[in-house]
Image (tube, rainbow, N blue to C red):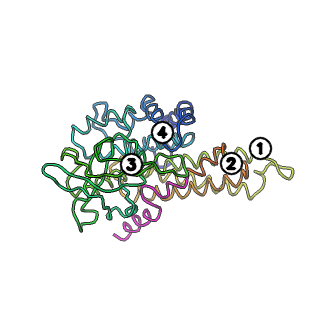
């Protein structure tokens, strides 16, 4: 990829993801229960080869996933099936701490099954009083003999309470803020682990987890004691640009819907594309989508070249998520009441597009990351 153009192979991967989302995943989403884990979609992503693409190490290869490939798959799926996009992303988000910090035995036990779509993974960081400030985590992991006992609450956890394995972050020392956090694997069904679903405005599987004296051996610890925040941030630095790709895909779909409608819809004797208020709004939207795409793939390419950093990831997520919100709003305005019909794609995007400005670090947190790097 140059700074300005994706290669033919990269474009083909994006188109392949879009086609899988449209032809294979959409029907499964339609038959599924909204707001619950759709295991058929997860399995389809495995059979279709997208999840194995996310985990190249399952092929006997130690290579990391290319951040650019992750962005291409997320953008392609987002254009046609945001639920499938989210299912793919959550498998990666919940599993990459295992890939990056797990023992060979952990990787062998979980990663191949996640890649096949046989196992559903989740990333459990947020708590009722610790969203944007992970240094305020209160869920405790107490050392007991050669193992640990975990107690506390997690909330707003995607795929909870139905995941098969959670990457979970707990406090192991007091007074150390983010430096007092350690990462663990908690299999679903572990005694003492319970949870409940949360009904959200978008049809995502999200819930709470309650841990009551959950006993784990030290073999379930990810990375070093007190290094859990670093485990989380290494994963988020990979995934934040791809959140931007998710939003670029949604914005592109919204723009395409608006352009198509503006060509066909007539008012006052002419197509509405001939009204400057409409055409200029869409011109601005198209410019913003292209700028967001370039920023996302620039951050991904830097990551793949070993030159990525938190600032680039934050810039990509910030600009792309904010852009998508504006572009979807413009598209809804162009289509008017038609876009607000429950069955219309724009109505669906309207519900989907708001959350990415919050999860994996709010827009305000991304600005803090960027500003901190500016003044470092």
Mark 2 or 3, closer to the camera:
3
Say which quarter of the image contains residue 105: top left
Residue found at x 21% / y 38%:
104
Tag 2 secondary structure: helix
Mark 1 and mark 4: Cα distance apart in space: 33 Å
Mark 1 and mark 2: Cα distance apart in space: 10 Å
Mark 4 and mark 3: Cα distance apart in space: 44 Å
Majority secondary structure of the magenta segment?
A: helix
Q: In the rendered view of the protein, which quadrant contains the N terminus?
A: top left
Q: Where does residue 217 sit, x and y in percent of width and height?
A: 19, 45
Among the two numbered marks 1 and 4 on one chain, the one whose residue lies closer to the N terminus: 4
Among the two numbered marks 4 and 3 on one chain, the one whose residue lies closer to the N terminus: 4
Mark 4 or 3, closer to the camera:
3
Among the two numbered marks 2 and 3 on one chain, the one whose residue lies closer to the N terminus: 3
Among the two numbered marks 4 and 2 on one chain, the one whose residue lies closer to the N terminus: 4
Q: Which residue is mark 2?
A: 258
* Numbered badge on residue 7: 4
Q: Where does residue 127 sit, x and y in percent of width and height?
A: 37, 58
Mark 2 and mark 3: Cα distance apart in space: 41 Å
Residue found at x 42% / y 41%:
69
Q: Where does residue 134 sit, x and y in percent of width and height?
A: 34, 61
Tag 3 secondary structure: strand
Drawn side of residue 142 relative to residue 123, left or right: left
Drawn side of residue 170 relative to residue 254, left or right: left
Mark 1 and mark 3: Cα distance apart in space: 49 Å
Q: Which residue is mark 1?
A: 264
Check residue 141 for magenta coloring.
Answer: no
Q: Nearer the viewer, residue 188 or 357?
A: 188
* Numbered badge on residue 182: none
């Amino acid at each position: 990829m140059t700074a300005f153009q994706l290669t033919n192979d990269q474009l083909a991967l994006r188109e392949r993801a879009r086609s899988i989302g449209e032809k294979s995943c959409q029907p499964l989403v339609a038959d599924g229960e909204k707001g619950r884990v759709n295991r058929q979609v997860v399995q389809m992503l495995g059979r279709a080869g997208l999840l194995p693409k996310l985990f190249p190490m399952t092929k006997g290869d130690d290579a990391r996933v290319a951040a650019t490939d992750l962005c291409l798959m997320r953008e392609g799926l987002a254009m046609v099936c945001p639920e499938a996009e989210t299912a793919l992303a959550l498998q990666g988000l919940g599993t990459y701490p295992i890939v990056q910090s797990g023992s060979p035995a952990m990787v062998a036990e979980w990663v191949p099954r996640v890649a096949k779509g046989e196992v559903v993974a989740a990333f459990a960081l947020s708590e009722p009083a610790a969203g944007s400030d992970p240094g305020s985590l209160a869920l405790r992991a107490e050392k007991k003999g050669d193992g640990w006992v975990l107690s506390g609450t997690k909330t707003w956890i995607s795929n909870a309470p139905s995941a098969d394995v959670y990457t979970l972050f707990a406090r192991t020392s007091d007074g150390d803020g983010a430096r007092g956090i350690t990462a663990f694997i908690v299999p679903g069904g572990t005694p003492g682990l319970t949870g409940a679903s949360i009904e959200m405005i978008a049809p995502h599987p999200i819930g709470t987890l309650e841990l009551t004296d959950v006993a784990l051996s030290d073999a379930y610890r990810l990375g070093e004691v007190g290094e859990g925040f670093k485990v989380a941030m290494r994963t988020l630095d990979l995934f934040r640009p791809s959140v931007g790709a998710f939003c670029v895909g949604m914005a592109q779909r919204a723009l395409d819907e608006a352009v198509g409608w503006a060509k066909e819809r007539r008012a006052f004797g002419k197509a509405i594309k001939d009204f400057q208020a409409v055409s200029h709004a869409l011109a601005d939207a198209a410019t913003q989508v292209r700028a967001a795409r370039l920023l996302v793939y620039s951050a991904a390419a830097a990551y793949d070249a070993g030159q990525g950093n938190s600032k680039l990831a934050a810039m990509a997520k910030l600009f792309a998520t904010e852009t998508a919100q504006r572009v979807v709003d413009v598209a809804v305005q162009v289509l008017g009441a038609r876009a607000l019909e429950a069955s219309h794609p724009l109505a669906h995007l309207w519900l989907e597009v708001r959350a990415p400005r919050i999860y994996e670090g709010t827009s305000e947190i991304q600005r803090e990351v960027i500003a901190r790097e500016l003044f470092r």
